[in-house]
Amino acid sequence: MIWSVIGLCTVAGIVVVFLKDYRPEFALLVSAAAGVFSLMLLLQPALEIIAEIRGRMETSGLTSVFSVLLKTVGICYITDFAADLCRDFGQNSLAAKVETAGKLSIVFICLPLVDSVLKITDRLIG
Amino acid sequence: MKKIICVLTAVILLSLPSSASAESPEEIYSKQYESSGIGQIYDELPDSAKELLENIGVDAQSGELPQLSVSGVFEHIFGLLKGGMKAPLTACISLIGLILILSLITLAMGEKNNYPAVQLVSVLCIASVVLVPMYQSVEVAISAIRSATAFMSATVPIYAAVIISGGFTATGTASAAMLQAATQGVAQLISFGLAPLMGMYLALSISACVSPINSAERLAELIKKVATWSLSAALTLFLGVLSLQSSLTASADSLSLKAARYLVGNIPLVGSAVGEAVSAVKSSVSLLGTSAAGYAVVALAAILIPVILELALWRLALNVGAVVSGMVCAPKVEGLLRSCDSAMAFFAGIAIYVGLLFIISFAVVSSAVGGVAV
């Protein structure tokens, strides 16, 4: 898997360097396509690792917490990827909006955790 | 005629068989035990404490401590440790697992744009894993402390009645008033002062861990200091006043008892016998008072020790978690766990404080009463 990603990114980088001077619009598309493919290559082993950790978390009763954590990390990676892509296209404003959307999504996902912590502190104070 | 009737009556009465014997100290003790109401102390105990007392060999109904051995007590303490270990141990293992996964994730994330968000979620995850079982233990601790104060408010009047019946009127009245005030004061202080204050401390500590505002942490520390100082000051002041008052009232009671013994000792023919009887009654009442105090202390320990042990185990689990967080460079998580540990230490401190307050009070009053020679 790691060799596939390294190979793909190296070839894509060389192609982008060649295309940059002649057809810059294609260079950007090649760069974006290489990014998407490398992510897809990483998805399979990542899913195996997640399934392994999820199995262990289920035995210790931490599935809900792990699920929140996993979603947060996923959102972080996807928003970072999308924001970087936007920056590559020269769209800094869009990149910032994607990051804001990612942060809002994380807050939304964390709400049950915040709620449970607040309930306990409320009971402690009350 | 009248003279003959009188002589005949006297002869008949004198010829009737009659016997008189003084009551033995054991009989006096058992009669006083029954009439004092010490047996009622047992009914005021929570079920868990009754079970524990029976397990360690205390005859709960009679209030005697004949089979209380050091090895037996330690054996049951180990039993309690085993019983109370489950929740903290589970939390500790979950914590370590979660901290390791979080460290792996933060390592994989690197210093990306959303890194603070992941840190926030990490702290929230740890908080939700730790706080729920920890809060249950805190609730049990507060309930045990309330049970201890309720038990004491039922025991103090009985103990005071025993002391007063032994002739220590001033000591009994004054100590009962002070102990009742302390019982009510402690109950109110815990319900409306310390428990909410510690909740505030914990809430502020959590907010300090998940936010970059430093003042929340400082405010939390201030709350903790205020609570600790107020507890220490109240304990010192109360015990100081009780010791002074007990020594003064015991001297006054000693004078009264000596005067009473002198008066009955001067009654012709039976004076010395009555004086000895007064001494016997006083000794048996002192023994009864010491037994009641000893039983109350053991019962109090039976209520509070399981809670203190569980809180200590929680502290151990939280410290292990904090050390692991420190090792994998997760300062926010470490801060949260240290704050939780401080809160647990404080709740354990309250339980120890309540136990010490009543145990030392009983010791002070018992020694003041026992030190009086008649």
Image (cartoon, coloured by chain):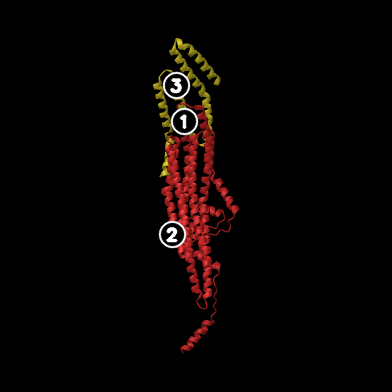
Give residue B99's position: percent from left, percent from top: 52, 34
Q: Which chain is red?
A: B
Q: Is residue B236 visible?
A: yes
On screen, residue B85 versus residue B229, left or right, reads right
Tags 2 and 3 in contact by the CB under 8 Å rule? no
Q: Secondary structure at mark 1?
A: helix
Give residue A42's position: percent from left, percent from top: 51, 23
Q: Secondary structure at mark 2?
A: helix
On what subunit does the disc labeled 2 rest? B
Give residue B156's position: percent from left, percent from top: 46, 59
Q: Which chain is yellow?
A: A
Marks 2/3: CA–CA distance: 75 Å
Which residue type carries mark 1?
Val
Pointer 1 residue: B118
1 or 2: mark nearer the eye: 2
Residue A84 shows which numbered tag? 3
Pointer 2 residue: B177
Front-most of B331 and B149?
Answer: B331
Instruction: Give the residue at x 52% y 56%.
Output: B297
